Amino acid sequence: MTKKEEQLKKKDDDLRELERIFHVFTEKSKEAVFLIYKDKIEYVNPALLKMSGYKEGELKSKSFLFLIVGPEKKKFKEQQKAHMLGKSFSHIGETKMLCRNNKEIDVEYAATLMKHKKGKAVLVAFRDISERKKAEYFLSLSEKKYRRLFEAAKDAILIVDYKTGKIIDANPFVQKLLDRPLEDVTGKEIWEISPFRNVVANRKQFRKLQKEKYIRYENLPLETSQGKFVPVEFISNVYKINNKPVIQCNIRDVAERKKAEERMRKSEEKLKIVTENIKDAVFAKDIDRRYTFVNSAAAEIIGLPIDKIIGKKAEEIFSKKNAQTIKKVDDINFKGQKVDQTEKMTIGKQERFLYTSQNPTRDKEGSIVGIVGIVRDITEENKTKEALKKSEERFRLVAETTNDLIYEWDIITDRLDWFGDIDSVLGYKKGGFPRTLKAWVGAIHPEDFKAVKEVIAQQRNVGGLTDIEYRIKKKDGSWRYWTDKGLIIADESGKPSKQVGACTDITESREVEEKLKRSEKKYRHLINTIDVGVYINTGGAHGQFLDINNAMINMFGYNREEFDKIRVSDLYQNPNDRKLYIDEVVKNGEARNRELFLKKKDGTRLTALVTAKAVFDERGRLKWTEGVIKDITEIKKAQEALKKTKEILEIEVQKRTKELADANEHLKELDRLKNMFMTSMSHELRTPLNSIIGFTDIMLDGFVGDVNPEQRKQLGIIKNSADYLLSLVNDIIDIGKIEAGKMDFDIKRFDAREMFEKIRNHFKLLAREKNVELLFNVPENLIIENDEKKIEQIIMNLVGNAIKFTDRGVVRVKVEQKDNKLKVSVQDTGIGIKKEDIDLLFQAFSRVETKNLPKREGTGIGLYLSQRIAKALGGEIRIKSEIGKGSEFTLFAPLKYDNF
């Protein structure tokens, strides 16, 4: 081997060793590495496969540009060409790599020219910088948010150099507050700006801002360029920006707050008036649990004057036991919870039940600063559980409120993230409401959709602030009113990318407004539709009308314009009566149902019933009187006429009373004669009927000789007719006895099973003839102490009727013992009874006929008599029926007769 060949061999060996080392290094490397030869991917390491998601076979021999996306693709291609021409040895940069799932990730790359066994090649290494890019984006976003808040703040904000005192930045509100350009402010030392000389007069006072770190001044008079003084709150604090200390000064215009405080003071005065005129005890405590407010009702319950309560703690004015009870309730409030409960307390010598409703009060920051509560003495209501329940419902004072919902809308993807319990607010299970713009828009009321759609379009294209109201649908279909206030956040290019905002549920306030409007409308409608005069007028001997209803116009004949001009005393027959009446009203606070003589516009006399109440201001001076007037002129006339009529009627009544007494004696005599007739008829009718029935039975039994079939048939007809007539006579006689109150009862103990067996045997043949299945369900050992014959008579009637009105069906007789009563149900599958005909069944001689069906025999007294007997025994008969399906008659009778 020549020396040259040895050198070539050594170079090949060295190259192979380098390639081995290269492969070992790249296989272990966490950086994604690939080798490019003649624009094709020659080699990829595992880290690249893991990063991209591709398999090795999907990349090898493909163009390296397959992995590159975005504007860097062209640049990367040109750089590769420069490598191969020897114009460039290496280069670095950033680009986006296309992964197998079409996801693009940010990468940092380094490309280097290297020797390869086939010739020149380029080695490329990728590093995933997605997280760094995301962090950079959010940092930029954070800075933009801060700047947006700084620019949009409603406080004037100054950024002052910590060492020099020079103003290095100021937000737009400084210009508005000081009424001077920002150029006149920035770059100057703070004490050079005249409005701030009350705080920082010179460099020496500036050192106080440096030293104190945090300073706060209230109600500081700030002079504008126009010489106008504005009350402000001045706050300075020291913090660092890029490790460099600065002083931030916040100046807030508190003029509106001062006005609000004055409104609050007036509101508190009104509240005091209200609380002093309600029966409930109202109180407030501070953070130290000392009473800061109590009304007269609270002082009355405690048993001390108000000035002896204010500033004191519970343990200073209550017994030890009561103070401990109060402390437990207060502890719950100071944990942020409300309390609604009833406590039993002994105050003085009285034991009282006190219902308490307490809530924690909070400052603007949400910190608890005290307690406010209402106490109601419910001692009387607590005497029974029902009274307690009503009291709790009546005293429930606090309603639940809905918290604001914060959201973030990604304008690019239309994803809508909610930072609050959106699911429960809209009635869904956890995670049930989709987090998309489409789902939110789909829940908006159709009438509000157009306005919301326009806002969405504006936010996509322009951005800015949103403040819109709309209705949104809950899962159960109900609607809630929301206000939606949002702010757009732009991306790096200035285009809207996200919106953050808050939704507030205002349904309750809207409903209250609507209710107030409806209530006022109803009140006005009611006042102007009643026929009683309603008025409000001033005091004094004469008085002027402030308000009237329509009835006053109709009653007195004046129109509204005339009522504005006339005096109240002009309506009186005697004007002096006005002074006497108003004096009584002012003295007593009211005067009820006074009969006054008034006059109409045309002078006609009017008698009226008047009730009035005095309304006083906080100093006890009369503001107005309000009242009602009822015209009783016609009533008074009617009373006089009634009095005369009464005298005439008394004479007529005496006359008619004598006539009625004579008629009553005559009726008694007729009743006696009827009873004699019924008694006589019972014997006269029964005797021949019994003879007919008896001799017919003798002939049918063959005692007088044989009878042929035709004779037997005719004799059967005679016997059935006689039996029916005898039953009818007995029923009529029983009715007479019941109506006369002379029915006798044979009370004895008997076995009900034997009685029902007798009834079953009686109707067995008749049921078979009508193809009716007769079923009895009678319990064993059912002993009854009552009139067996009467009960048997009732059941015989019910069973007979059931069979009579049933063709080819079933009649069920079910016997039960229930609550010391005998219950016998007779159920059939017959023709049934119309609902409107049921009441006729228990009327004497009344029969119910059904169209298109043959008439059944009967007199219409069976059910009437059965019901009368049942009631005489202490029971009753009830009916359930449906036309075409059948009927059920149920007898209820006491197991043991009680001669009530």
Image: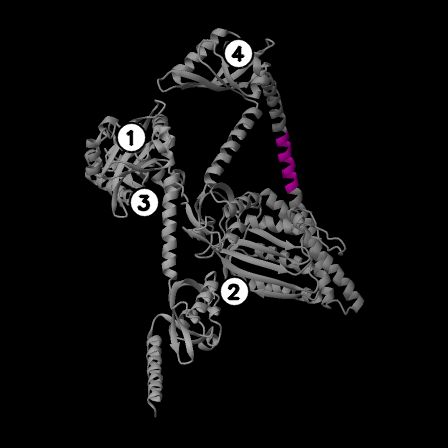
Q: Badge 3: how crowded within 10 Å, few (<14), some, or many (20+)?
A: few
Q: Mark number for residue 337?
A: 3
Could you tell me the amino acid type at mark 4? Phe
- Left or right of 188? Residue 789 is right
Which residue was labeled with disc 1?
294
Which residue was labeled with disc 2?
779
| Residue depicted at x 45% and y 73% | 54
Could you tell me the amino acid type at mark 3? Gln
Where are the magenta residues, as a range? 663-675
Of badges 3 and 2, the one in the foreground is 3
Of badges 3 and 1, the one in the foreground is 3
> Is 751 drawn above or below residue 42 in the view shown?
above
Query: Where is residue 529, by image quadrant?
Result: top right
Q: Nearer the N terminus, badge 4 or badge 3? A: 3
Which residue was labeled with disc 4?
597
Of badges 4 and 3, the one in the foreground is 3
> Is 28 drawn above or below residue 338 in the view shown?
below
Q: Distance between the residues labelled 2 and 4?
A: 81 Å
- Left or right of 830? Residue 384 is left
Q: How far apart are marks 4 and 3 (CA)?
A: 61 Å
In contact (CB < 8 Å): disc 2 and disc 4: no
Whole-percent x and y of residue 407? 43, 49
Could you tell me the amino acid type at mark 2? Pro
Whole-percent x and y of residue 452? 53, 44
Q: In this orientation, which residue lies closer to the viewer: 700 or 252?
A: 252
